[in-house]
Image: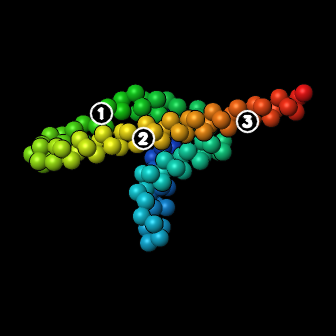
Amino acid sequence: MKIFNQIGILLGVWAGGEVVSQLIKNIINIPGSILGMIILFLLLQFKILSEDKIKDVADFLLGNMGIFFIPAGVSLIQSLGLIKENAVLLLSCIILINITVMIGSGKSVDFMIKLKEKKQAKSEEEIA
């Protein structure tokens, strides 16, 4: 019964995201599944929903995430001709995006490290 409750919670949050998506579709078009994830994040972050309430089902879904990529893989195989025609463009985009992500991640980590060092220095000054 515990598993059904956890599935029900996740499906309820997803359905809530779909409802919100339909309500705001004239303002901004965000998929309901994305809004559901944001709602779930907020519920967990503000301790409205305990992690224990969804842990078993979430662990199962995360452990078997590869299954959810099968339809995308099949679709890629069906589009192999299109991919071959645009291989140079696709590879260029992939390389450029990866470089951009690496640089952005590095800069973000540097910023957070400096922020943490400033916070530690400030707390050491207050202690002294």
Instruction: Mark 2 or mark 3: name the one nearer the start of the chain.
Output: 2
According to the picture, the residue beneath numbered tag 2 turns out to be 101
Count of numbered tags: 3
Residue drawn at the location 60% of the way across and 46% of the way down:
43
Asked if residue 94 lies left or right of residue 111, the reply is left
Residue type highlighted by circle 1: Ile
Q: Earlier in the sequence, mark 2 or mark 1?
A: 1
Q: Which residue is mark 1?
A: 67
Binning the other alpha carbons within 10 Å of mark 1 as few (below 14), some (14 to 19) or many (20 upward) gives few
Residue 118: give its label.
3
- Give the number of the disc on residue 33: none
- Quadrant containing the C terminus is top right
Q: CA distance from mark 2 to mark 1?
A: 26 Å
Disc nearer the start of the sequence (3/1): 1
- The spot of residue 23 in percent (x, y) is 48, 67
Alpha carbon distance from label 2 to label 3: 26 Å
